[in-house]
Amino acid sequence: MGASYDVRGSVAVVTLDNPPVNGLGYDTRVQFAAGIEKAWADPAVKAIVITGGGKAFSGGADIREFGSPKAIAEPNLLSLIKMLDDSPKPVVAAINGVCMGGGLELSLGAHYRVAAPGVPVALPEVKIGLIPGAGGTQRLPRVLGVETALNMIVSGEPVKSELLMQVPGQKLLAKIVEGDVVAGAVAFANEVADVRPLPRVRDMKLTHPNPDAYFQFARNTARAMAKNFPAPPKCVDAVEQALKVRNFDDGMRAERDIFMALMLTPECKALRHAFLGERAASKIPDVPEDTPQRTIAKVAVIGAGTMGGGISMNFLNAGIPVTILEMKQDALDRGIATIRKNYEAQVKKGKLKQDKYEQRMALLTPTLSYGDIAQADLVIEAVFEELGVKETVFKKLDEVMKPGAILASNTSTLDVDKIAAFTKRPQDVVGMHFFSPANVMKLLEVVRGAKTAKDVLATVMTVAKKIKKTAVVSGVCDGFIGNRMIEQYSRQAGFLLEEGCTPAQVDRAVEKFGFAMGPFRMGDLAGNDIGWAIRKRRYVEKPELRYSKTADLLCEMGRYGQKTGAGWYDYKPGKRDAIPSTVVEEMIEQHRTTLGVKPRKISEEEIVHRLVYSLVNEAARILEEGIASKASDIDMVYLTGYGFPLWRGGPMCYADSQGLFNVVQTMKRFAQNPLDDGSFWQPAPLLAKLVAEGKSFT
C-alpha cells in the first residue's frame, strides 16, 4: 500500500496505491516521492505519468490520518506538488477516476492532464468548513478561468471531466482518453517528451474583465447562501488573491493563512466531526469489516401506508425489486397511487426522467398474499405501532419466509427483542427504523436485538449505503437513540410553556439557534396524537415521570396538528404556514392559573440550553448504557434525522464546544428551578466523570 513504479519504453509510470480512493497518506506520499526521484535519476526515462490504482486517481487527504502527526509529516502534499512543478522531465497526470481535493491539487502540479470520460472532478473542502489548502484556489482559476473555478470551489460539487473539457479556453485537460487512460497518457507523454519550456500552471496568467464588481457579487451571494458557514465567502477571498497579488507565491501564502484560520473555527471543527462521524457510523466495534454478508436481491415491504410506501421507494430508487403487501385491495391501491404521485411530482420538476420513473415502477409488485413474499431476502414491516399487531405479522413471517431471510421491523419505540421472540429465528430479526418521509430523510436507525446475528447487522449496514442512508446502530431501549432523547426535549418544551413562554417564542429561539424546526412546529407536522399515545403509555409505566399537561389539553381539543388544520398553531387550508393561535395561548394561560404559576420572562439562551442540554444529558445515559457505541453516532442521528444545525456538529459536539464543565454548571442551575424536573438535571454519571477528568465526549 503506497505507490508503485514501472517503466513503459521511455516513460515512467508512478501509480498511487492506497485503496479505496488512493488517499494521500504518509506512506503513499513517501513512496510517490521516491518514484518521482527514481524517474529523474534514470537517463532512459524522458517523461513521467502519474495515475491512481483501481477506480480512483485520488480522493485527496487520507481521512484515516486526520488530526495525526502523519497528516502533515514531510513529504507533505505541498512538497509533492513542488516536486512536480520543479520536475526537469514532463509530468502527465492520467486521471483514471475520482479526482478530488488534494488529488486534484496534485494533478495541477503536473505539466499536462488527460482524463477518462465521466470522471468526477472536485475541490470539496468547503464541505468540511475549509478552503483548498494546497494551491487549489490559486491553480484551478488559472486553468478554468476565475468564474468556473470559483463556482466549483464554493459549491464543492463534482463536475464530470467531459463537461470541463467544454469550458472555453480551458487548460485543465489536454484531452479525454477513451479506453485505457494510462496507455493514452503514455502515448501523449511520448509526444510532449521533448517540448520545452514545460508548461507550469503556476506561470499561467490570470485575468478578469471586471474583478472588483465580480468578487463583490460572488462574496455577497456566498454569504447569503451559507450564512452560518464562514468557508464559502473565504473561498472568494482566496480566489481574489490569485488574481490580485503580485506573484504566485504570495497567493499561496494568502491561501494558507485563510486555510489555517478556518481550521480553528467552531464551524470547521463541527463539519469535520460530522464528516468523520458519518464514516465512523458504519463501523460496529464487535462486527469485523470482513464479516460475510447475506445477498439482498429482492425486498418485501409490509404495509402500503406513508411509511411503507416511502421505504419501498428507497429500494426502487436503488434498482432493487420490491413486493409490497397489504391486507385490503383499497389500501394497496391507495399506497401504489401515492408512490406513483411522488414519482410524477419529481418528473414534473425535472428531477427524474420519464424512463427512470417507468423503470422504478416496473420493479414494484403489489400483493395481498404472504405467499408472494416468501422468497424475499429482506422483509421490512411497516404496520401500526402496536405490539399485538407486530406479533401477528412476525408470527406469519416466521411461517412463510425462506430460511436466511432478514426480518426487519420499522418500529420507532417498541422492544425489538419482544418482536424477535415472536419468531423461531430471533437471530434474523433486526430493527430498521426509517424516518418520515422515508424516501427523503437520510437517517436509518438499525436496532440490534440481543440475538441479532452479526452477518445480519453487516448486511443491513451495506444495504443502507446502497439506498443512500446514514445508518446508525442502536441497542434496544424505549425510543432507541433519537426518540428517547427527543422525549426529554419535548418535556422541557412543555415546562417552558407552563413557566411563561408561548409556543412561537420557544420555536423562534430554537430555530434561531439553527434547528430546522422548533418542537411545537415539529409536533404539528408529525401529529400531536402520536406523542399523546406515548404519554398515556408513560402514565401507566412510569407514573413518577412528570409532563406538562398542556400537550394533553391540546389533544383533548382535537388539535392534532397540520392534518386537522389546527395544533399548537392554526393552519389555513392547503397551506403549511404556522399561525400563532389565540385559542392555544388562552388554554396555556388558563392552565398556568390552575397551577397557580405566575409567568416570567424567559431568555432565548435559557430556552436553547434547556432544550439542547436535555438532549445531551439523556445522550450521556444512552452512551453509558451501551445503547450507542460512540458520541459521534448520537450526533449523526441528530444531524440526519432531527434537523440539528450541521455547523454545530450535533448535540455532543456542541456540548464539547461549550465546555462540559460549563454545561454541568448550567444544568445545576436548572435543577434549582421548582417548576422544572430537578432530578432529571442531575448530570448523567458519564457526563460527571468526563468533567471530573477534564475530558470531552468526542
Image (cartoon, rainbow, N blue to C red):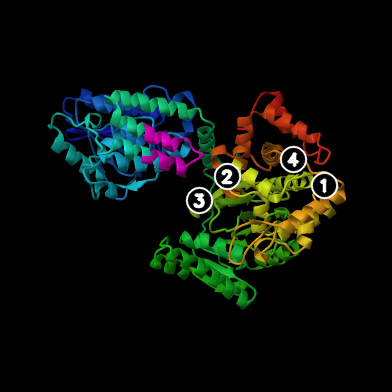
Question: Is residue 163 or residue 662 the one in the foreground?
Answer: 662
Q: Residue at x 39, y 35 (%)?
A: 235
Q: CA distance from mark 3 to mark 4?
A: 47 Å
Q: Circles 3 and 2: CB distance less than 8 Å? A: no
Say which element carries label 3.
helix
Q: Which residue is mark 4?
A: 601
213 is within the stretch colored magenta: no
The residue lying toward the viewer, choosing from 43 and 243, is 243
Q: What residue is disc 1 on?
A: 545
State the quadrant of the N terminus. top left
Residue at 38% in and 22% down: 74
Q: Position of residue 546 (x, y in %)?
A: 82, 47
Q: Identify the residue under disc 2.
A: 639
| Image mark for residue 465 | 3
Instruction: Say which of marks 3 and 2 sits in front.
Output: 2
Name the front one of labels 2 and 4: 4
